[in-house]
Image (cartoon, helix red, strand yellow):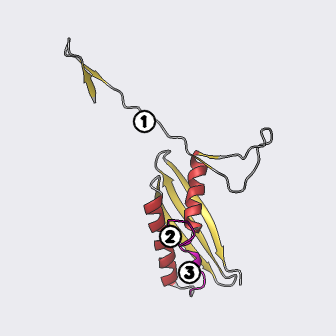
């Protein structure tokens, strides 16, 4: 993009400097700041990781006015621990992140079943696009009964 002056007809280039946005999110552990006694917010990549984790752990019909939002992993906990369930877990995670989290690019999802302890171990590797940072989240889903 350039600006043209009417009198001299010279073109002045406008530099397009990309500025990184500052993201912030509420920390659900509600940790207080030592001095201000206010809740400490999450910033930048920690805020994005928190958003990804919340999206993955959200089940269908949990959010008002958005019943289809979520990966619905809780619904798959009591399914047989086989390859079909692993594929459904991966598809649920990929689809919710592709639709609701455009700030990241999913690189790899590793799902391991631990049938002796009735749980799934999920390791999600992704790249935060704006900061060009690779990050990962490890989640353990376990049955309570």
Residue for badge 2 = 67
Look at mark 1 in the image and give the residue it sits on: 18
Q: Residue furthest top?
A: 7
> What's the magenta bit mostly, secondary-structure-wise?
loop
Residue lying furthest right in this view?
34
Position of 11 relative to 73 (above/below):
above
Mark 3, secondary structure of its residue = helix
**Does the residue at mark 2 contact the one at mark 1 (Cβ under 8 Å)?**
no
Q: Secondary structure at mark 1?
A: loop
- Residue 48: x, y in percent? 56, 52
Q: Residues within 10 Å of mark 2 (few under 14, many from 20)?
A: few
Locate the C terminus by quadrant.
Answer: bottom right
Dot 2 lies on which element?
A: loop
Residue 131 lies, with reference to residue 28, above or below; the image says: above
Residue that appears at 73% across and 53% down: 30
Disc 2 to disc 3, how far (Cα)? Answer: 17 Å
Q: Which mark is residue 76?
A: 3
Q: Earlier in the sequence, mark 3 or mark 1?
A: 1
Q: Does residue 21 belong to the magenta stretch?
A: no
Between the C-alphas of marks 2 and 1, the distance is 36 Å
The magenta segment: 59-79
Q: Specify which label sits upstream in the sequence, 2 or 3.
A: 2
Asked if the residue at tag 1 contacts the one at tag 3, i.e. Cβ–Cβ closer than 8 Å, the answer is no
Residue closest to the far bottom: 80
Residue 32, image x, y percentages:
77, 47
């Amino acid at each position: 993009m350039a600006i043209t002056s009417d009198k001299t007809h010279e073109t002045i280039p406008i530099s397009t400097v990309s500025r990184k946005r500052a993201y912030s999110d509420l920390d659900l552990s509600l940790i207080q700041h030592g001095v201000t006694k206010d809740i400490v917010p999450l910033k930048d990549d920690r805020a994005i990781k928190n958003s990804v984790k919340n999206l993955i752990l959200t089940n269908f019909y949990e959010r008002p006015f958005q019943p289809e939002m979520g990966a619905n992993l809780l619904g798959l906990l009591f399914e047989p621990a086989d390859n079909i369930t692993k594929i459904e877990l991966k598809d649920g995670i990929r689809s919710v992140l592709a639709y609701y989290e455009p700030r990241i690019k999913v690189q790899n999802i590793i799902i391991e079943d631990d049938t002796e302890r009735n749980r799934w171990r999920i390791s999600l590797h992704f790249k935060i696009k704006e900061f060009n940072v690779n990050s990962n989240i490890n989640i353990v889903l376990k049955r309570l009964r």
